[in-house]
Image: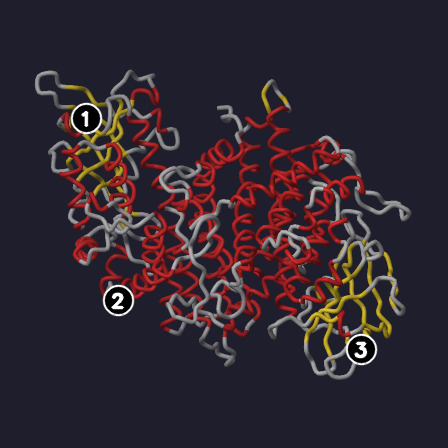
Amino acid sequence: MDFTRNETQEAVAEAVAGALTTAAPAEDLLTALPSRSVEDAGYDETLWRSFAESGLLSLGLPAALGGDDLTAADIAVVLEEVGRAGVVIPALETLGFGVLPIVALGTDAQQKALLEGIEDGRILTAAVAEPGSPLPLEPTVRLDGSGSGGGTLTGTVTGVRYAAQARSVLVPATTSDGTGVLVVVAPDAPGVTLTPTLGSLGVPEYAMRLEGTEVSDDEVLRGSGADVLGDFQRLVVAACLAHGDGLVSGSLEMTAGYLKERVQFGKPLGSFQAVQQELADVYIVSRTLHVIAQSVAWRIAEGLTGPADRYESDAAVGAYWLAAEGPRAVQVLHHLHGGVGVDITYPMFKYSSAVKDLARFVGGAEFQLDRVGAAVAADPAEDVTVSGDDASADAGDGTFIDLTPSQRALQAELREYFSTLISDEEAADIGTTRHGKTYEEIIKRMGRDGWLGVGWPTEYGGKGFGHIEQQIFTNEATRADVPLPSVTLQTVGPTLQKYGTDKQKEMFLPGILEGTVHFAIGYSEPDAGTDLASLRTTAKKDEATGDWIINGQKMWTTGGHHADYIWLAARTGTPDSRHRGLTIFIVDTSDPGFSFTPIITCDGAHHVNATYYSDVRVPADMVVGEVDGGWKMLTTQLNHERVMLAPSGRPGGYYDELAAWAQGTGPDGVRHLDRPEVRRGLAEIFAIVRLNELLNWQVSAMGENPSMGDSAASKVFSTEKIQHVGRIAEELLGRFGDPTDAATAKLQRWFDMMNKRNVVITFGGGVNEVMRELTCMGGLGMPRTAR
């Protein structure tokens, strides 16, 4: 898995930046207004000329036409960077709506005829809608003619940017035999009437009326497959996603820069917690939009489209996310700018207006959610089987946004394994007794089967797989609602591998993989939750024996009543030493000074405890790392825990349960999946699962040193979206489910229990407000918030 740009794409990004800064200073590019005069072109002509002279318009042309023959993923980088700069030029239309479709769907002769002179700055564009029908797959525009030749076009299309300025317009149409085609129309051809229409950005946009417009066979693009209009739409959506990705990230970067400099109340606005909370939410939108945009463009470039690709719905998921979250995100950025953001000479309006236009071009959030729903209805269950017919790409150097065949095989094997690991009786028991003997037996079972060390290095007894495989393991376990010794296996174990002594590694790591050694975390205290640096539990050294004597109390110790050891943070420095005076100890719970009091949580289960330490003795060789150096251990463990708390398998399991229920019928005999409300709810959950999965992959692909900003953002997204997903499920079950049906009633109880259980995860592993601060610091370089 690799989300980074390849060398070609890095060079393309540099070339775009160079072209845009050559024509004018960066600040001029941002503040120049798009022309609203009918006499003007409606775009920055000087900048467009510089863009063309830099060779950027020939990047996607075939080599036979003097181009660089770059892929859709490479052109997506161009459109992303144009969006990031906030400039007004017809790059989206010419490259995304024109060049890419003509190269993909036209014959060699058509490419030569239609693309001649494009490298010099001639404009191409396309119709993205008909009245009342965005991105139509069955256009009402008719191409009437005989045989496979040309004919006459009749109908109306809308959303045609730069139609009057363009050399050609691509128009989706339906032939007399019902075949979808793409027709190339000259805007000044007989029978064509252009009517200016409203666009938020203010660039020229038109409705095009076609009344018997004659076209030749050479002007009809039929492609090489049966889904010409589907292919065209994927390219249009990919272009909109790439451009929208750049617009959101560019406006976010601009806003972050403004907030670092703008001082109020004697401090930069960006240092206020309330500001960072909102800014972090936009960062999360930006990152989710980026990974789905990358996936769509990469899959097109690799030929992974159509029914053979199990991520075929990525384009609809991305378009939905762009329309649902893009305008909302830039509205927040407007708000954070205050009055300056609404000044027409300030660039913010260009970003927000452009995003609004893109949301309209893709049909809006509800329209695209219905398209996701159609995919869900066609195949409600996610298929993870591996077959020779399944489309796949080889993982080589550079971008690769997919599971390899071996990873898919692992995913399928684990899904099958976890589906039969726990009996119904065991599942019922661990529903309320989360860390009892049943739980212990399940963990030992996984240890005996050799599955606990998927992501561990072979030198410590693991399988030696990578971070992606570890994420697959976690996702599939949580999807099946199989409990994992997550704290022990995924946080304490890796931290010991990095910082533990040889004795500690030999003493604990083999038992962890066998499922016989269990840890709990002892951090939070009655007066030290989020502010861990203020904890008061003390560790005093007994100079006579060298032991450390622990005294204090911890709260919310998950699994503390069952654990063999507590991974405990205690103060070894002075009371005011804060984070500089903390040390990590491994506390044996068999010590007579250790005790606990159960805390029953609102899901009815015993997960957590108050734990007490009265003169508990810890040998000196059970100190992890350096004395007074525990803050590094603590943050390392928490970083692992944050990734652990964000698996896509959690909402994936919700989706599986709800999709299975939706196959049934209600008292009226209607299948639940055929109800628009149920289909739309499942579609939204499906989209969230996919975005969560891509975030998991992106963070895991960073290896041992993931971005602090992206790790924290992933935790916030996953832990908050799972609660939203739970509300969707309960609402649909409450509205359409029959509570007198035993299976439905059981499912309702399960969702109620899980939703109550998930309340904790927005503050467990680091409260999400602090996660948002870390997102801003790590992802945007914002200052530490004022306390």
- Tell me the quarter of the picture where residue 624 sits: top left
Residue 420 marker? 2
Provide residue 139's location: percent of width, then percent of height: 72, 72
Given residues 217 and 603, the one toward you in this image is 217
Given residues 208 and 558, the one toward you in this image is 208
What residue is disc 1 on?
Answer: 550
- Tell me the quarter of the picture where residue 621 sits: top left
Q: Which amino acid does label 3 sit on?
A: Gly
Q: What element carries label 1?
A: strand
| Label 1–label 3 contact, CB within 8 A | no
Q: Is mark 3 on a helix, strand or loop?
A: strand
Q: Which amino acid does label 1 sit on?
A: Ile
Q: In this view, does 38 lie to the left or right of 568?
A: right
Q: Which amino acid does label 2 sit on?
A: Thr
Residue 151 marker? 3
Query: Callout 3: 10 Å neighbours few (<14), some, many (20+)?
Result: many
Q: Is residue 396 left or right of residue 427?
A: right
Query: Callout 1: 10 Å neighbours few (<14), some, many (20+)?
Result: many
- Could you tell me if residue 562 is visible in this image? no
What's the residue at 59%, 50% (across, down)?
A: 74
- Tell me the quarter of the picture where residue 225 sits: bottom right
| Label 1–label 2 contact, CB within 8 A | no
Please report whichever mark, 1 or 2, sits nearer to the chain's N-terminal start: 2
In the rendered image of this protein, does residue 525 appear above or below residue 74?
A: above
Q: Distance between the residues labelled 1 and 3?
A: 88 Å
Provide residue 324's location: percent of width, then percent of height: 61, 53
